[in-house]
Image: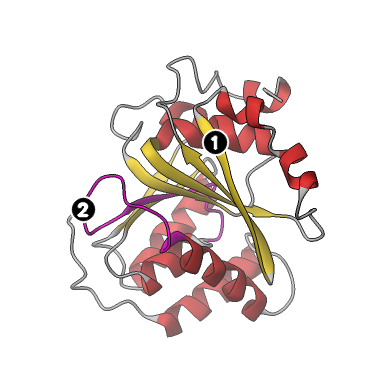
Amino acid sequence: MPDTDHAVPSPAALGDVLLDARRAGFLGPGPIEPHLEHAAGFVDLARRQPVPSGTRAPHILDLGSGGGLPGLVIAIRWPAATLVLLDANERRTEFLQRAVRRCGLGERVAVVHQRAEVCGRDPEYRGTFDGVVVRSFGAPAVVAECGAPFLRQGGWLIVSEPPGAPEEDGHRARWPADGVAQVGLELGEFVREGFGYQVLYQREACPERFPRRNGVPAKQPLF
């Protein structure tokens, strides 16, 4: 995937894409605007994070991309970034491939149809991303185990927190330091900017034993 921002993405096309995603059941009900605002929060927070690869073009994974949020919004609002939209559902990834073309993002955004547990062991993807964003994927232990293998050392993980998620000691209970440390992560800041976001950092390389085989992270969570 070339490091380029030559393509001019289409925000107008994105609106149509999200309407189609909602009709297909890949996006929750209600107006599109709150979904866009939520995704914009990911962009603002991601742009404040380090780029451990040392390049001007951060490489970001949207884990469990679904209807394309926040990945498509990040790509449109951050022209230097390259992204991979990962999803295990074939119907969703076919939709995402069409969405990327409609938004004019094909030079900077790739779509991968694969389970995270498998993709996280693939040398093409393991330890190659500056950041991972997660809108709706699973419980904190599942997100940590499936997200950490993709990150370079020094990379970051930004996770959407549910409405009403506690902002002080409570969020640390959801993301215990000893629990996330098993996959090399360290708890960062909790941000409430309309929506809640938890930031974690890949302080050490994720141990080779993670992620475990398909389905195990959810059935036998680390914490």
Q: Residue at x 72, y 23 (%)?
A: 219
Q: Position of residue 125 (x, y in %)?
A: 33, 35
Residue 17 pos. (x, y %): 50, 73
The residue mark sitting in front, 1 or 2, is: 1
Say if the magenta span includes residue 90: no
Q: Amino acid at mark 2?
A: Thr
- Front residue (pair 102, 135): 135
Residue segment shown in magenta: 46-67
Distance of label 1 from label 2 (alpha carbons): 23 Å
Residue on which the image places disc 2: 55
The image quadrant of residue 35 is bottom right
Residue picked out by circle 1: 186
Element under label 1?
Answer: strand
Q: Nearer the viewer, residue 3 or 215?
A: 3
Measuring 39% from the left and 74% from the top, which residue is drawn there? 77
Considering only vertical position in the picture, is 114 above or below 204? below
For the point 46% across and 69% down, the residue is 73
